[in-house]
Image (cartoon, rainbow, N blue to C red):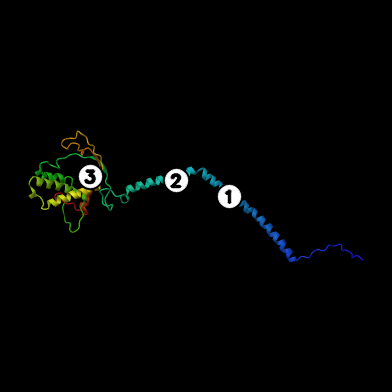
Amino acid sequence: MDQKHSPYETVPITDDRDHEESLSMTEVDESLMGDEKPWAQQGGRRSRETKSWLAAFRSHRWLIDTSLLVVILVLVLLLHRERRKDPSTTPQQVGGDFGGNGPQFATQVVKFESDMSFTPMNTTEWFSNDTLARWNTIMPAGTGWGSSEGTFFTTSMTHQLHCVFMMGRIYSGVKAGMADNLPDDYHFHFMHCIDYLRQGIMCTGDLALEPHEPNESEQSGGLDGGWNGHHVCKDYSQVIKYLEKEITSGVRVVLDIDD
């Protein structure tokens, strides 16, 4: 006898816990998918804003670069002007103190001129009061030893003038047979001055052009050219005033030109 089939199909038995976990995972996935939409929208909006800023920057890049260059140029000019105003930040001036002390003197263009009152052709006049007085007109007031004791400070310019004057006087004394009027060490003094002036000339390095013309005055010597140049010089009146102030304040001692 055939067995009767049940009208109901056999349904496999599943664990209720597995079923609940499956449902739970599905709900989580759907929840995450739903949350991704606002984040994606925000990210897209930020990306569009960034691209917009970059596009604006690129289109105005030339204007930004030009503005920055103008600002840099203005700052450089202002800094240069301030450095010129402040002596402490100004580079060392040729002929100035190596420590930067002292003012920055104004300059003048000077054409050298022959003045025989400083260099009389009559050798005996080198020992006259008139010639000495003439040389003192280019020296600061207040020269002399004063009350200085121990170490003191003079200045190179007046030392060089002293050397030139003494060389003229020593030569004239020997030439005129008046060596008795010269210091005992006049030979050494003369050679010392040559060496000292040599280095002073090299230090200054005056590069003024001196035109040589065939019709030079016979007095200065043919093709001499020494009086044709124009030289950039410190304002000598400012130099003298500064030295006189230094002498008065006791900072410097300037010896007499014939000492």
**The furthest residue to the front:** 1
Q: Which of the marked residues, 2 or 3, is nearer the chain's N terminus?
A: 2
Query: Would you say residue 127 is visible in this rendering?
Result: no
* Residue to which mark 1 is pinned: 47
Residue 148 badge: none
Q: Nearer the viewer, mark 3 or mark 1?
A: 1
Q: Which of the marked residues, 3 or 1, is nearer the chain's N terminus?
A: 1
Determine the secondary structure under disc 3: helix
Q: Residue placed at 12% from the left, 44% from the top?
A: 131
Image location of residue 10, percent across then percent down: 82, 64
| Amino acid marked by disc 3 | Tyr
Image location of residue 253, percent across then percent down: 19, 53
* Residue to which mark 3 is pinned: 236
Image location of residue 52, percent across then percent down: 56, 46
Q: In which quarter of the image is residue 24?
A: bottom right
Q: With 156 as the anchor, is 132 left or right in this view? A: left
Determine the secondary structure under disc 2: helix
* Residue to which mark 2 is pinned: 68
Q: Which of the marked residues, 1 or 2, is nearer the chain's N terminus?
A: 1
Q: Which image quarter holds the N terminus?
A: bottom right
Query: Would you say residue 16 is visible in this rendering?
Result: yes
Q: Quadrant of residue 4?
A: bottom right
Image location of residue 42, percent across then percent down: 61, 52
